[in-house]
Image: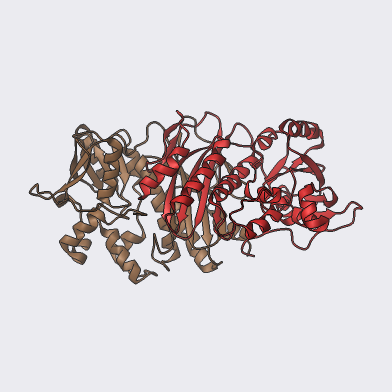
Chain colours: A red, B brown
Amino acid sequence: MDEFSLIARYFAPLEIPSPDVLIGIGDDAAVLAWPAGEHVVAAVDTLVDGVHFPHGLRADAVAHRLAAVNLSDLAAMGARPRYATLALTLPVLDEAWLAAFADGLGKALGTARVSLIGGDTTRGPLTLTLQVLGSVNGAALSRRGAQVGDVIAVSGTLGDARAGLELALAEPLARSQDPLLASFLWPTPRLALGQGLRGVASAAIDVSDGLLADVGHIMRHSGCAAEIDVSRLPLSSALLASVGAARARDYAQSGGDDYELALCIPPAALGAAHALARQLAVPLTEIGVVRAGSGVRCVDGQGRDVTPATLGYRHFV
Amino acid sequence: MDEFSLIARYFAPLEIPSPDVLIGIGDDAAVLAWPAGEHVVAAVDTLVDGVHFPHGLRADAVAHRLAAVNLSDLAAMGARPRYATLALTLPVLDEAWLAAFADGLGKALGTARVSLIGGDTTRGPLTLTLQVLGSVNGAALSRRGAQVGDVIAVSGTLGDARAGLELALAEPLARSQDPLLASFLWPTPRLALGQGLRGVASAAIDVSDGLLADVGHIMRHSGCAAEIDVSRLPLSSALLASVGAARARDYAQSGGDDYELALCIPPAALGAAHALARQLAVPLTEIGVVRAGSGVRCVDGQGRDVTPATLGYRHFV
């Protein structure tokens, strides 16, 4: 099987027919008609075998993760995802792996109605890069814009994926139905929440490096400080039952890979934000407040400073 | 140095300030105002260490190549390049390497006035993926559209990069001034030619896999056959002097990495195409004709069939 048959068999079916795709998979580049007045929103994320997912992880979960981490970036901007390009570097041509990968990618992109419109297939150590293109009509959400007095809130529950990662490391083929494992394997980008909070939230980020690190990014870009009440972090009963309260809180603060949205919301907009979250059936929990200053400070339920020494995962430290 | 300092030091300077970049490097995604009525043209290419360039190749040449192979795809579409995102996977944090890489990338993108607006930096085996976004106002050039009777033409000279690759393999730091080495190290995407030939040429592709393989792509997409007179292939005097006539022709046919444009041009448009090439000081050589049928046939100056058994480089054969 050569590169062209591989693309025709596994990836061309992931292009969604549309009159806006003037030229799709198979040419030197894709050509897309763009809706008048809509800005282009572009994000790119790479997954490296053994770095961003356990070596040997089932291929459909690798593909789901690749789509989800990118779509989560668009969710944090409040953008509507439209197109994706895939740069796939494979050590060998393993058709069973490719079939499962394409199936997982098709489902993850299809659920978000994202059309695969191009890519590149190369031979080398397993490395996967997806670029997603979305659109916004008006101002995007961003890391900049938090104001002193805004409430800090987070969607879903935190820390489950960190616990699930340990399960996936122990069982890369991941056939069990454990809900923590599922949190790691099948993260759900909060696209509808992000799109609905444009013009409501003042700043947003998706939780990939860990809550405290990611809230720290908002604060650095916005020139403010965060005070997080760690007693209010949303923890699932599965996480508490599995690792206990102390480690659950640690995972929720710094574990990463949650792909929930961390948001700053002006007090006057809280009602609208909660109404939207209820409508979408997405938990939205107030966990802190924006203060003057810089950095992220954690307090417990009694107001004592419990800020950890390091905030989360950082590459190349 | 963490990921954020790395980006701030080496890559943030490659973003070109513009009111169209509403949100650039540093957020979850970039947000770009797009010119009304201009289509979005997206291409992505990956370079893997030791596969697409010799292991140890000087970092500024790696960066130039990464930019050039992507910009060459936009040239083949007749698109104007605008933005790029970089997914950079590095085994170690080598600041000297990074400084040279960023310098090479900045020069290559800057020459084409392309702004770096985002990316992702990860740890793993050296793998580089660039996505470029360009625009066209009207129909793009593509692989589809060649008509029986069109003339097949190619820009520049062919085969030099193949000979230069051998020099680079022998000397990855590549300090010598050999013109063949330079052809491999510093390919020039034919952006102005591609843009100018929109509405003039009927089909186009950039020569990356090798002339015959790439002309074959046009024919497959257009439903025609190519007849190439290999005695007319444009060969540089440096190539002929270095490897002799027989190997020079072989390199020109199948060597790859030329990043010239192969074009199909209706006879009535030949005058306009040559006038544009002269104005741009780009050699444009007629090398064949489009016939009914399928595939690529080579003939020599006496009309004898000299089609080689395999047409060029194919991954995963």
Q: Residue at x 57, y 61 (%)?
A: A50
**A192 with respect to B218 (left or right):** right
**In the image, farthest residue toward the front:** A176
Q: How many marks?
A: 0
Image coordinates of residue B237 in percent, x first then y, are 19, 60
B31 or A304, nearer to the observer: A304
**B78 with respect to A15 (left or right):** left
Which quadrant of the figure has residue B104? bottom left
B85 or B124, nearer to the observer: B124
Quadrant of the image for the C terminus of chain A? bottom right
**In the image, farthest residue toward the right:** A302
Image coordinates of residue B207 in percent, x first then y, are 30, 49
Image coordinates of residue B125 in percent, x first then y, are 50, 63
Q: Residue at x 57, y 58 (%)?
A: B122
* Position of A30 relative to B281 (above/below): above
Which quadrant of the figure has residue B276? top left
**In the image, farthest residue toward the bottom:** B170
**A132 with respect to A222 (left or right):** left
**In the image, farthest residue toward the left:** B302
* Position of A248 relative to A11 (above/below): below
B169 or B101, nearer to the observer: B169
Residue A257 appears in the rendering:
yes
A150 or A242, nearer to the observer: A242
**B39 with respect to A240 (left or right):** left
Residue A296 appears in the rendering:
no
* Position of A309 relative to B76 (above/below): below
Image coordinates of residue A216 in percent, x first then y, are 73, 53
